Image (tube, rainbow, N blue to C red):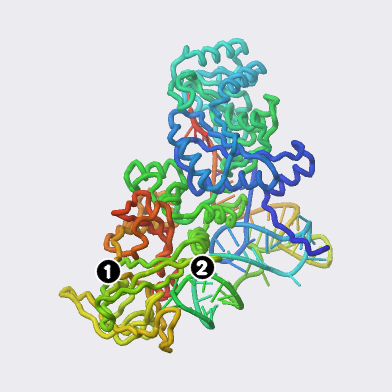
Amino acid sequence: MENTEYESKNFIEELIEEDIRNGKNDGRVHTRFPPEPNGYLHIGHAKAICLNFGLAKKYNGTTNLRFDDTNPATEETEYVEAIKKDIKWLGYDWGETEYYASDYFPQLYQFAHQLIDSGLAYVDDLSPDEMAAQKGTPTEPGQNSPNRDRAIEENKALFTEMREGKHPDGSLVLRAKVDMASPNMLMRDPILYRIKRQTHHRTGDEWCIYPMYDFAHGQSDSIEEITHSLCSLEFRHHRDLYDWLIDKLEIFPSMQREFSRMNVAYLITSKRKLLKLVTEGHVSGWDDPRMPTLSGMRRRGYPAAAIRNFCDKVGMTKRENLIDLSLLEFCVREELNKTTDRVNVVLDPVKVIITNYPENQTEQLRALNNPEAETPVHRELSFSREIYIDRKDFMEDPPKKYFRMGPGRNVRLKFAYILNCTDFKKGEDGRVEEIHCTYYPDSKSGEDTSGIKAKGTLHWVNAQDAIPIQVNIYDRLFNDPTPDGHDDKDYTEFINPDSLEINTKALAEASLQDRAPGTQFQFMRTGYFAVDETSTKDNPVFNRTVAMRDSWAKKQAKK
RNA sequence: UGACCCAUGGUGUAAUUGGCAACACAUCGGUUUUUGGUACCGACAUUCAAGGUUCGAGUCCUUGUGGGUCAACCA
């Protein structure tokens, strides 16, 4: 048949399918996710995780988790644990294939000797400044080091001494003998090993020399027989060295390909810059709900499924990009709309007295938890003479298009009755402090025979049993779409001073008293919220994940 | 004054490989609605430029233009 669906593939999938067609690696697909354990995973990593694990799943392959831990100065076990937790939370499982570049230190050391034996590596004693001076520039060739032609035996002896700790930190390095005139600066005799007396989080003090990225990453890929090693665009120039080393070492030919990093407006994804936000106290930690880290987004209430869907929608190309934050928020709302229970929470309470409702009466109303759910589930909601509504749902002198409460107007209370506003009282400060209404007894939700129409529907809480909660209202951390894209200004200058508003006057329906951290809700007409991990029965705390789409507010803002 | 990569609506991608520029987000308008939510309907680009090849070019070629990356004993 001709109506078979055509599935569009990204350039990496095209490449993999071509390899499979050609029988390369017997059609095997083996990817890896290689974080350095020097910080927490962020939204940018999510794209790489989804890519690597997604590809392996699609082509029946495997994905290794490999910690790229070759720089003991910055790496810690704390980060290893956090990274594993975040990957699992995102929904991926690496099974038994958990590796560490540091496990390969002995093998890498042998590789270095192999290169020396082939006359393709030498020990250099130049200072960093001298080396830089000889490096040349992108338009001028560099100069050979005076040590470049050191005898093989001497190189072997010196390198062995480096490993044995006979030379001080920084005094010697091992360099590959490639080409000091290469147009690719990375091929100008790159450093392979440096001396660094620093305790490693896994190997302790066993080593005082450590391989550089270029002599660890590709070799680790090769040792693990990774077929497709995918990384971001800025590593394109490393590919020449990657291939050169594999070729000279005659080891498994892993193939590196590059894709463009994900840039999301108003977010930053530089680990160094995120670390600074933490250490300088701009946020409460790596998992602050305003952080673009997976732990921060988790705490904020972004569902893993939403992040996966976002990564999928963003696509895979080699172009520079700046993705609208609204796409991420769309994915979050789309998921939460399907999954969360709707509850009544009043953020800025104003008391409403229903003057014709019996003083000592309380009735139980039936409330639908989630109208989107396949099987409807209901809960009970208590209702009585005094309730609270949100301050912004009342106007003393409302315009015609305002559908909420105002003197003389009818408005429905969700799951309850239609009210008619008869009066209101103001305090000394001029603020409305009490609203009087009457209710239509025959307008009860689900059994309304009143025939009365109310344009608006409000959320509310029963004054008798409403509980006080703390609500953290989060907004974007930066005021600028590209906070770290300005040459003349530091990104911290764009920090939004109003990125967190702590609301302690909110009142919630009684069912929210003792909910487990991480539980998510839609606060009816307000937004999506998640129970914070610090929340307790006596002090419930909720984080705003994202506000509802609000076409009314949008219209008002334009005026 | 080098090398490498990239260029399709406001944004991110697609175009069955040379054959009617599609999808999503955003924006605007409308319908439905006991959430100003959801759902649904509609509007919104002749593909960076100029040449060339061709019956036919977003796609191929040439030359430009614009953007990105590269000179850490970081990854």
Which residue occupies the foreground of this view, A381 or A396?
A: A381
Relative to A16, say whether A543 is above or below.
Answer: below
Residue A541 in sight from this viewpoint: yes
Judged left or right of residue B44, residue A77 is left
Residue lying at 40% horizontally and 46% vertically, measured from the top left = A287
Q: Looking at the picture, how far across and down is residue A219, in whole percent?
A: 62, 29
Asked whether the beta carbons under mark 2 and mark 1 sit within 8 Å of each other, the answer is no
Q: In the image as oriented, which residue stretches furthest toward the bottom?
A: A451
Residue lying at 32% horizontally and 51% vertically, measured from the top left = A536
Callout 2: few (<14), some (14-19), or many (20+) C-alpha neighbours within 10 Å?
A: few
Q: Are marks 2 and 1 on the same chain?
A: yes
Residue lying at 55% horizontally and 29% vertically, measured from the top left = A101
Relative to A203, say whether B3 is above or below.
Answer: below
What is the chain identity of the residue bearing mark 1?
Answer: A
Q: Secondary structure at mark 1?
A: loop
Relative to A406, say whether A508 is above or below.
Answer: above
Which residue occupies the foreground of this view, A524 or A330?
A: A524
Q: In the rendered image, which residue does mark 1 sit on?
A: A464
* Distance CA(mark 2)–CA(mark 1): 27 Å
Q: Secondary structure at mark 2?
A: loop
The quadrant in which the C terminus of chain A is found is: bottom left
Which residue occupies the foreground of this view, A150 or A231?
A: A231
Label for residue A376? 2
Q: Looking at the picture, how far across and down is residue A417, in whole percent?
A: 37, 80
Q: Which badge, 2 or 1, comes first in the chain's sequence?
A: 2
When asked about the image quadrant of residue A2, the answer is: bottom right
Residue type highlighted by circle 1: Gln
